[in-house]
Image (tube, rainbow, N blue to C red):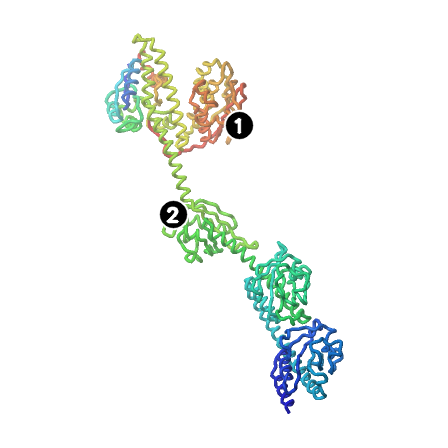
Amino acid sequence: MARILLVEDNEMNRDMLSRRLQRKGFEIEMAVDGKSGVEMGRAGKYDLILMDMSLPEIDGWEATRQLRAAAETADVPIIALTAHAMAGDREKALEAGCNDYDTKPIELDRLLGKMAALLGNEGADS
Amino acid sequence: MKRENALLRLSTGIAEAESETDVCSAVVAGLYDAALGYDFVAVLLVDQATGDRVLVASEGWKDAPPGLRIRPGQGLSELPLLDGRIHYTPRVTEETRYLPTRNEGSEADVPILANRELVGVLVVESNRPDAFDEDDLKILTAAANQAGIAIGRARLLRAERARADEQEALRATMADLAGRLDLGTLLKAVLERAVRLLGVSHGELAIYDAETEELEIVANHNIGRKDTTGTRMKLGEGAMGHAARTHEPLLIPDYREWSGRSAQYAAVDFHAVMVAPLLIGGHLVGAIAFMDKDPARQFGPEDLRLLNLFAPQAAIAIENARLFTAAQHQRQYFQELVDNNPVAIVTLNEHHDVVSCNPSFEKLYGYTQAEVVGRNLDDLITTEASRAEAVRYTKQALEQRPVEVISQRRHKDGTLVDVEVLGVPVIVNGKRVGLMALYHDITALLKARREAEEASRAKSQFLASVSHELRTPLNAIIGYSELLGEEVEELGVAQLGDDLGRIHASGRLLLSLINDILDLSKVEAGKMEIHCETFPLAPLVKEAAATVGPLVEKNANRLVVEGAAAAGTMHADRTKLMQMLLNLLSNACKFTRQGTITFSVSRDGADGDGRVVFRVRDTGIGMTEEQMGKLFQAFSQAEASTASRYGGTGLGLAITKRFSRLMDGDVVVESTPGTGSTFTLTLPAVVRDSAPAGALGGD
């Protein structure tokens, strides 16, 4: 069962996405801002991190850069989640070190596809 | 002895007399002496023009009419003029020639010769018949001789003086006329000179208006109570009009009896009138008229001679002055245009120094004309930033290439003024003499425009923020309805599935509407960025076709894709291109049932600067010309009712149009109602990156 860290400041988005992913068999932990996201990410040995880009304290791009800079999280796959399909967001996210990128509102099937690609065989157990 | 004294007095009187009239008066006064005993003494002088004898002086006839004229063929006084001898008539009543003034008496008529020419008659009468003896006739002959000598002398003197006057008058006139170019003053001067030259009491001068074919009196001398200035006469009307029409001088012995007199001069009672046209090479410029209050004054060959000397010169002077005045009026006209112009105008010489400026310039820049004349314009009104540019423009305008720019200049107090500048060379007779610069103050205009743009930007910004804020709760609605949809079965409330589906579908529609508004307002706020990447076209086409697949099936349509394999790559904003293609494809699906939608891609033009053409053709309901007209406007589906029937925000095509323009391309439509529509999107194969400042980021 893959361990996922969801970094998201909006409570409803956090609740909704975590519940849907849990239903798919993932183990979800959550951080509410960029700073705690980095701390939890480095401490928690996650298989994948879902990173909202617009966050309080430090934003998603900066949090991603810090995670990439740290030895223990340098290789953990990170998927950026941004609001609107803004051209440029994708490159910006990839530049910061994200492995992939998806837009909100979440289309679960699409996101699951991207997660599965990054997790390989360690995907959800369903 | 008494007689001798009388004659002595007579001689003294004649010697002292200067003019003809004085001589005649002295003769008459000397002979009308108690010692001599004559009852009537008179001198009549011959009018050379008419041959009339004119009464110049007389004694012994109370109320003698001055200027009385006796026509040839009448009176005893003509006899000496016919044979040059003295005539004595002892009994006047026996003579048929006698013009009866008394019942009986005698009369002596003595010729007066001046310079061997008969100039008049001395007439002496007595109430008694046979009153004259040999002695009387000797005395009278001596008096007539003396008078003749004196008259001859007076005439010489007068001619001498006239000639001197004439020379002086002509000299003065010409000097004056050459110097005076002010028409009004000049015309008056011309007339005064002419009046003095001819020794007349009255004169009038008219100039000719070729446009109306009228003469207008512009100057007069001594004309009665009524000022005739401004009187206009048609060609041919009155004496002036007559001379103007015939181009010949006209002498009228007695104007009161002249048949051609103008109604405007009906009340005038001049006797002799002389009129001459003023001509330059046969071209009429005016007319001049002379009159004299003295009935004895007639105009003769001498007057005509003087007039012929004078008139051509006066005509030239008048014409010069008229041309000068016209030029001055023209100049004044343009000066008025410049002075009252709301646009600031300045003229420069070839060294960029100010020659003149108008009041608007003074107002715009705070300098008075005195402060700027002779100074370098670019030193005065430019800023550090605009100086080099201004100098370049000045140079360019001097090189005969007009300059038209919007720029900033400096007021005297240092503040900046937004101006629209127009610089043009001033060319006179093909020669460049300087330049003229016009400054239109557009400070208020620019301010208004900035405010309007600011307001428009603020509106777009507001719309963008509102749309953005709406999306967060909307995401929750969509997300939870999906979550619930997954959970309904497990919760055993499957009957709620349909309702949840409706909430979910409405949420998605609302979201796409908001996204479209956000896109449009970003384009309109100038904040839509283009991010280009190079990508192969075949996968893009495939992806678009796949995405629109469910919509194609929904209306039982068939999708045909053409040309994708050979399309190659392009460099553009892939996300926006995809959005445009999906808009066109979903549109085609929406308005077509059980038909075919053809999606083709092709290349147009050379590889380097070629274009990629995407075409979406459907066999749907089509559109009329009118519907196509507003198709690409925001919130305008061809008909208001269409939105409810076919769904959609009505923003897709507006967004597609704007995106295509952002990428230097365009989208156009061809359509036939009932047959179908074809949308053609053309983009450069290599789109230029553009990066408007301050894109909206974050969620």
Position in image of residue B94 (x %, y %): 76, 79
Q: In this image, B94 relative to B56: left or right? A: right
Judge by depth and name the residue closer to the eye, A32 or B134: B134
Position in image of residue B242 (x %, y %): 67, 60
Which residue is situated farthest in the top direction here?
B492
Provide the secondary structure element on which disc 2 rests: strand
Q: Is residue B571 visible?
A: no
Q: At x 39% / y 39%, what residue is drawn?
A: B450
Callouts 2 and 1 close, C-beta under 8 Å: no
The verdict on a common chain for dots 2 and 1 is: yes
User: Any mark on residue B604, and which?
Assistant: 1
The kind of residue tagged 1 is Asp
Q: At x 37% / y 22%, what residue is drawn?
A: B511
**Residue where numbered disc 2 is placed:** B416
Vertical position of residue B642 compared to residue B279: above or below: above
**Closer to the camera: disc 2 or disc 1?**
2
Q: How many circles with numbers are drawn on the protein?
A: 2
Dividing the picture into quarters, in which one does residue B367 lie? Answer: bottom left
Vertical position of residue B326 compared to residue B416: above or below: below
Position in image of residue B26 (x %, y %): 62, 82
Which quadrant is the N terminus of chain B positioned in? bottom right
Provide the secondary structure element on which disc 1 rests: strand
